[in-house]
Image (tube, rainbow, N blue to C red):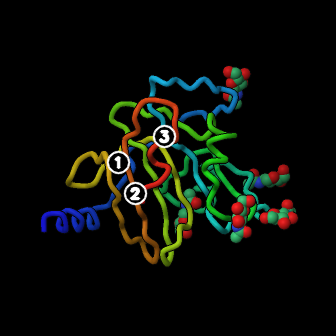
């Protein structure tokens, strides 16, 4: 009963990103420190973008063009050749230094994703603070909210120290 209420509260109260990390994603800066905690940080633009519909703007260009506010987008922007979800093993192997952020105390590894008819439309991975209204800071779990015809899901976890694929790889 409590859990259900807790969940309903989360549904009613918007989950909001308080702070979006602005790491510089400099790919040549590859000196990861095993004493630090990392999270995946990038934005996958979803199935409508592929090698025929590349996007050469930045996250800010994108948000400005669409006139949207309050939606996270963390560079780098990831678009796959055929529009399918990125191959995380490939990203980890060849682009590790540009798709990670250092998680600082108080931050979580998060994934903020839009779903339409159950299918993921896009997703932003980041180091951030997640706050559920009325509950304070969230350190783990997934929260959903309906936004018009879409569902926005925010998932959070805390990565440990070391250089391995961070916990916001997968939440199911
Ligand atoms: C990335 O880092 C390298 C070496 O630290 C530096 O020379 C280069 O200017 C940086 N690039 C950007 C885009 O910040
Ligand atoms: C994308 O690149 C083309 C050619 O370089 C340029 O004309 C266009 O303005 C760019 N679009 C954006 C959104 O930056
Ligand atoms: C993700 O998809 C939603 C729904 O189509 C859209 O409103 C939003 O701007 C998109 N966000 C990003 C970062 O692509
Ligand atoms: C796009 O990728 C597909 C494979 O997914 C390939 O067959 C096609 O030639 C590519 N098109 C361009 C313009 O690169
Ligand atoms: C898309 O490309 C990936 C990687 O090249 C491949 O594994 C996957 O089967 C492709 N999916 C479709 C639907 O073509």
Percent x, y of residue 60: 60, 49
Residue 146 in the image: state x and y as whole percent. 38, 71
> Label 2, on which residue?
154
Tag 1–tag 3 contact (CB < 8 Å): no
Does residue 64 appear in this view?
no
Q: How many marks?
A: 3
User: Pointer 3: what residue?
Assistant: 39
The label number, if any, that marks residue 130 in the structure image? 1
Tag 2 and tag 1, C-beta contact below 8 Å? yes
- Asked if the residue at label 3 sits under 8 Å from ligand 3, the reply is no
Gap in angstroms between the C-alphas marked 2 and 3: 15 Å
Give the residue at x 65% y 52%: 78
Residue mark closest to the camera, 2 vs 3:
3
User: Quick check: 162 above or below 123?
Assistant: above
Mark 1–mark 3 Cα distance, whole angstroms, equals: 14 Å
The tag earlier along the polypeptide, 1 or 3, is 3
User: Which element carries disc 1, helix, strand or loop?
Assistant: strand
- Element type at marker 2? strand
Q: Residue at horizontal 57%, vertical 47%?
A: 42
Q: Residue at x 30, y 49 (%)?
A: 131
Q: For mark 2, does the 10 Å Cα neighbourhood hold few (<14), some (14 to 19), or many (20 or more) residues?
A: many
Residue 103 visible: yes
Asked whether 92 or 55 is in front, the reply is: 92
**Residue at the image point whose x is 21% and y is 52% from the top:** 135
Residue 2 in percent (x, y) is at: 13, 64
Q: Nearer the viewer, residue 29 or 70?
A: 29
User: Which of the marked residues, 2 or 1, is nearer the chain's N terminus?
Assistant: 1
Q: Relative to 22, does residue 62 appear above or below in the rendering? A: below
Q: The C terminus appears in which quarter of the rendering?
A: bottom left
User: Counting residues from the N terminus, which is met first, the one under dot 2 or under dot 3?
Assistant: 3
For ligand 5, which image quadrant applies?
bottom right
């Amino acid at each position: 009963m409590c859990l259900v209420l807790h969940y309903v509260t989360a549904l009613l109260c918007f989950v909001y990103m308080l702070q979006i990390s602005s790491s510089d994603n400099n790919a040549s800066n590859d000196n990861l420190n095993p004493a630090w905690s990392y999270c995946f940080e990038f934005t996958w633009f979803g199935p409508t973008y592929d090698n025929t519909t590349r996007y050469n703007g930045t996250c800010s260009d994108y948000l400005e063009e669409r006139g949207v506010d309050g939606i996270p987008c963390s560079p780098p922007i990831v678009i796959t050749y055929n529009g399918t979800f990125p191959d995380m093993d490939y990203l980890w192997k060849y682009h590790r230094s540009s798709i990670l952020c250092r998680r600082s105390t108080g931050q979580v590894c998060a994934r903020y994703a839009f779903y339409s008819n159950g299918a993921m439309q896009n997703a932003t991975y980041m180091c951030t603070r997640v706050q559920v209204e009325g509950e304070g800071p969230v350190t783990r779990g997934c929260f959903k909210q309906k936004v018009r015809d879409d569902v926005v899901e925010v998932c959070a976890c805390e990565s440990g120290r070391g250089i391995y694929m961070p916990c916001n790889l997968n939440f199911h």
